[in-house]
Amino acid sequence: MKIAFVAPFFFPVVGGVEQVVYELGKRLIKEGHEVHVFTSDCGRKEYSEGKSCRLKEKEVEFEGLKVHRGYHLFHVSDRGTIWLDYGKLWKEDFDVIHSHVTGHFCNFMAGLIAKIRGIRYVHTTHSPWTDKHRPLLARLAVTLAGLSWGRLTLKFADKIISITPWEFDQLKKWGAKQDKIIYLPNGMDKIFFKEIEDNNFKKKFKGKIVLFLGRLHITKGPEKLVEVAKDILKERDMDFVFVGPDEGMLKEMEKIRDGEERIHILGAVKGKEKLAEIYQGSDVYVLPSYREGLPLTLFEAYASGLPVVASPVNGIPYEMKDGENGFFVDYGDLKNLKEKILKVLDDKELSEKFSENNKEKAKNFSWDEILEKTKEVYK
């Protein structure tokens, strides 16, 4: 097959959507398929830092994926961008066009081209729906999309992949037909299942390790965990580790950290082997977000046997049960967040129960299995 992925951003931009496109794409290439990625020329990290974010190379090959970057006109916050240049997508004879992230204009264009040319069109949602915490401009953009091009995108689609059942009602509000919608979650690499005997990451720290792994973005709440860390470290001897690229929150985190040596902000870490080592070397994974679709990091933490403390938002409660996989803590409830982190660390029997439950649950989310199900959707 000749397959076109369409997404608002792609590497070097780092995030869940970009990872999904990469994981599916590289496996399809390995099976002999030809894979193209159509995206914008916007580097999101640079935008969040107030710098020029235009990537210079427009046509590149990334680990076998043929990447085509269109000229972006403007942004809607740091999450959305309007870009041009769909000529190659129109001209090439693709068997499938698969777009990502509901509400983006590029997906409307992908669906329109697929409809006119008679190409099978698949769309994955990635849970972009608005909420009270989002900037006003972003909320207006999502609302407008729901009344116009976003609604048409869902109409054009032959199949709509929802990454969590939480989205079903929202999709119906946007006009999606029930028989088009299928539930297919994100996956993770097998490397996270493999036990690492000699863990060099863990050797770097003296005490137990509380891990945050994800983009340092306001939606993820990393600064909330720094606040809790400062409080806990007044009475406990442990380490708090933050891993992930900065998307606007690093300065705030450093301000709250105020030189505390047991709070370690490591930045982005490349390589799944290193990430697996970080997960397995930690004692609890914390995700204090106010908005999530269905984060890849949740499944990676599960596979690594980590207990999880997370906000019960959006898709997370569909794949995590309070008291079974870890604990839920409402966003911004710092007192309860502190209590639940310490409960996991202090109760060995409970922690081991969460660990075993999570390892077992993770078996349902390998990328190889998700790929096979995705190919069925392409038929």
Image (cartoon, helix red, strand yellow):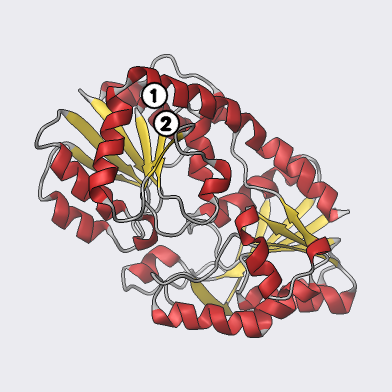
SS under mark 1: helix
What's the mark number on residue 351? 1
Vertical comparison of 19 with 114: above or below:
above
Q: Which mark is residue 307?
A: 2
Q: Is residue 199 left or right of residue 25?
A: left
The residue type indicated by label 1 comes to: Ser
The foreground one among 27 and 209 is 209
Residue 210, percent from left and from top = 30, 35
Query: Which residue corresponds to the image point at 14% horizontal and 43% vertical from the top-left?
Result: 231
Is 174 placed left or right of 220 in the picture?
right
Residue 84, placed above or below residue 67: below
Residue 246: where, in percent of width, then height? 33, 57
Q: Quadrant of residue 98?
A: bottom right
Are the residues tagged 2 and 1 within 8 Å (C-beta)?
A: yes
Q: Judge whether residue 272 can be spotted in this image.
A: no
Q: Is residue 113 left or right of residue 61?
A: right
Residue at figure coordinates x 83%, y 54% from the top left: 378
Q: Residue at x 74, y 43 (%)?
A: 371
How far apart are labels 2 and 1 at the CA level?
6 Å
Foreground of the two, 19 or 252? 252
Please name the amino acid that badge 2 sits on. Answer: Pro
Callout 2 secondary element: loop
- Of residues 351 and 44, the one nearer the viewer is 351
**Earlier residue among tags 2 and 1:** 2
Q: Position of residue 43 (x, y in %)?
A: 45, 66
Relative to 88, say whether 20 is above or below. Answer: above
Is 330 on the left or on the right of 156, as rendered?
left
Viewer-proximal residue among 105 and 68:
105
* Residue name at image x 53 percent, y 71 percent: 41
Residue 175 pos. (x, y %): 73, 75
| Above or below 71: residue 98 | above
Q: Residues within 10 Å of mark 1 (few under 14, many from 20)?
A: many
